Image: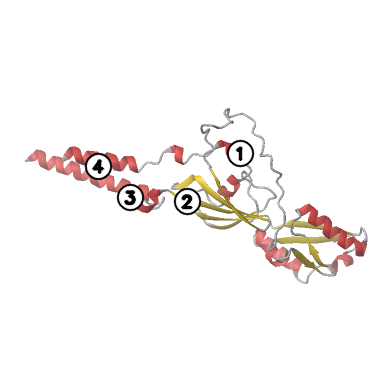
Amino acid sequence: MKHFAYAILLILLASSCISNKRITYLQNLPGNEVIDIDEFIPYANVEYKYVLQPFDIVDIDFASSDPELTEAFTFQGTKNIRGGMMGAGGGGDLFYFTGYSIDELGFIELPKLGKIHIAGLTENQAKVKVQEAINEYFKDDVFVKLRTAGIRYTTIGEFGASGTHVILRNRATIFDALASAGESNILAKRNKLFVIRQYDGGTKIHQINLHDRALLASPFYFIQPNDILYLEPMKIRQFGNADNLSSSLQLFATFLASGLLIFGLVRGSL
C-alpha cells in the first residue's frame, strides 16, 4: 500500500511539471538551417508593405505656410479632439474619431476633393494620390501627411491579456505583439500559434511555431494590421488554468505526503 501511494505521488509530481521544450521560444529544432547563435538571419524574401483595405482608418493631415488654405480640409473640433485624446493617452484609438474610414468599395471622402480610391495602395502610394488631388486646387502650396492608426491586432486564447491591442509603430514583430499582449500563458501550445490574416478579398489562416528559430526568417515574423492571433491550450488545461494548476497540484501533493507520513507513524506504533 505504501509503495503504491509513493508511486502515485511521484506520478502527480511528474505531471505537474511542463518540459522547457514546450515553453521555450526560438529553439534550434532539427532541420533548421540556422545553427550558430551568432549567425546572421536575413528576413524572409517578402516585401513588408501593408496595403490599405476597406474599413481601415487613415489619418490625413494638411500643412501650409498659409493656414487659411488648410481650413477647408479640417473638420471643426478635430484639432481639439487630437490634442485632448493624446493628452489623455488615447493612443491609436484617436484615429477612430479624427481619421477617415475607407468604405467597402475602397474610397475615402475628403472635403472639397470628394471621393478618392486608396484601397489596395500602400501608405505612401495613398499619400501621393491625395497629394495629387489637392495639388489641382493649390499647386504645391499644401503638404499632405497620411498614415494608418498604428498596427492594430487581436489576441484570443491562452494569452496573458486577450483583446484588441495597438502598437504605434510602422513595423512590429510577432514577439512585440506577444509582449504587448502580456506574454502567452504557460499552458499555451507555443508550437501552434494561428495567425488569421486578411488579404485582398478574403482571409487566410496560418500556423506558426514559436519554438522554432526558423521563425525569424519566415514571412510571419512581422505582424500586420488586423491580424488575429490565437493560441490553443494544452490538454492539461481541462484540469485547471495556469494560475492555479501548479499550486493545486503542489497542495494536493503536500496533503498526500502528510497523509502517508501519518499513516506510516501510526502503522509503526502498532
**Pointer 4: what residue?**
8
Could you classify mark 4 by the number of other residues whose Cα lies within 10 Å: few (under 14), some (14-19), or many (20 or more)?
some
Compared with 253, 69 (above or below) is below
Q: Quadrant of the N terminus?
A: top left
Q: Which mark, residue 216? A: 1
The answer to whether residue 99 of the structure is visible from this angle is no
Query: How far apart in space, not on screen, are marks 2 and 1 (Cα)?
Result: 21 Å
Residue 43, by quadrant, is top right
Residue 166 occupies quadrant: bottom right
Q: Which residue is mark 2?
A: 232
Q: Nearer the viewer, mark 3 or mark 4?
A: 4
Q: CA distance from mark 1 to mark 4?
A: 42 Å
Say few, some or many: other residues with alpha carbon within 10 Å of mark 1 (under 14 / 14 to 19 / 20 or more).
some
83 to 13, vertically: above or below: below
Who comes first in sequence, dot 1 or dot 3?
1
Mark closest to the chain's N terminus, 3 or 4: 4
Contact flag, marks 3 and 4 (Cβ < 8 Å):
no
- Which one is closest to the eye, mark 3 or mark 2? 2
In this rendering, would 222 be left or right of 211?
Answer: right
Whichever of labels 2 and 4 marks the residue nearer the N terminus, that label is 4
